[in-house]
Amino acid sequence: MAPMTKTIQRTLSSPCGRTSLAFCGPLVILALGSCAEEMADEAATLAADSPQVQTEPQPDQLPLPEIMVDLERDMAAVGAGLWTEDPQVIAAAARRVAEHPSTTLEYRQAIQEELGDHFPTFVGYDEDVHDAARLLAERAEAGAPIAELLELHHEVARGCVGCHTAFRGRLQPAMDRLRANEP
């Protein structure tokens, strides 16, 4: 039997353990509730800190590592919006994911050279992420239930993680070489 299972069984078999576990649920809810306002502020900060939210026009193309940093920040903002059940934060961050800039020609060529016949799969992952993020933004704007938005967030993340799992290890050396040549 796993050590955690034994600990839980021991706790449940003790009268004090059952009592203390009975209080855990309400305490967790109380703790999360008190954090909700803080999380909403943090979600707004994450969204506002994203370079894609600036009023100045953004470049159409960025180096892939910069795009990834922005996507990470925007996915965190979607997550924060889900935690705080704020559809405006979810929609804005998902829209930024859906409309992220393309990578520069230099990075695209390096990716194509490294992946060869697998490049269309890489592009397919990118299209899946764009489509899922666009749908997430639309459904959040339409007031869809949080459970549905969470499922759509999962679809976006699945595309991100799928691409990373399939290609990150292969592409990292090429990205490092390109970054070393940048000013």
Image (cartoon, rainbow, N blue to C red):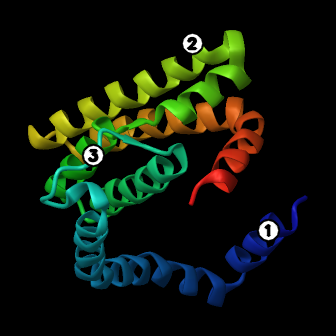
Of circles 3 and 1, the one toward us is: 3
Q: CA distance from mark 1 to mark 2?
A: 45 Å
When asked about the image quadrant of residue 174, the answer is top right
Mark closest to the chain's N terminus, 3 or 1: 1
As drawn, is 45 to the left or to the right of 122?
left
142 or 119, which lies in front?
Answer: 119
As drawn, is 108 to the left or to the right of 32?
right
Of circles 1 and 2, the one toward us is: 2
Q: CA distance from mark 3 to mark 1?
A: 41 Å
Q: Is residue 40 above or below residue 118?
A: below
Instruction: Return the residue found at the far bottom.
Output: 16
Which residue position is annotated with label 3? 96
How far across and how far down the image is residue 11, in percent?
71, 79
Residue at position x 68%, y 74% in the image: 12
Q: What type is the residue that disc 2 sits on?
A: Pro
Instruction: Return the residue found at the far right.
Output: 1
Badge 2 element: helix
How far across and how far down the image is residue 134, in percent?
25, 32
Q: What type is the residue that disc 1 sits on?
A: Met
Q: What type is the residue that disc 3 sits on?
A: Arg
Which residue position is annotated with label 2? 120
When asked about the image quadrant of residue 114, the answer is top right
Q: Are marks 3 and 1 in contact (CB under 8 Å)?
A: no
When asked about the image quadrant of residue 30, the answer is bottom left
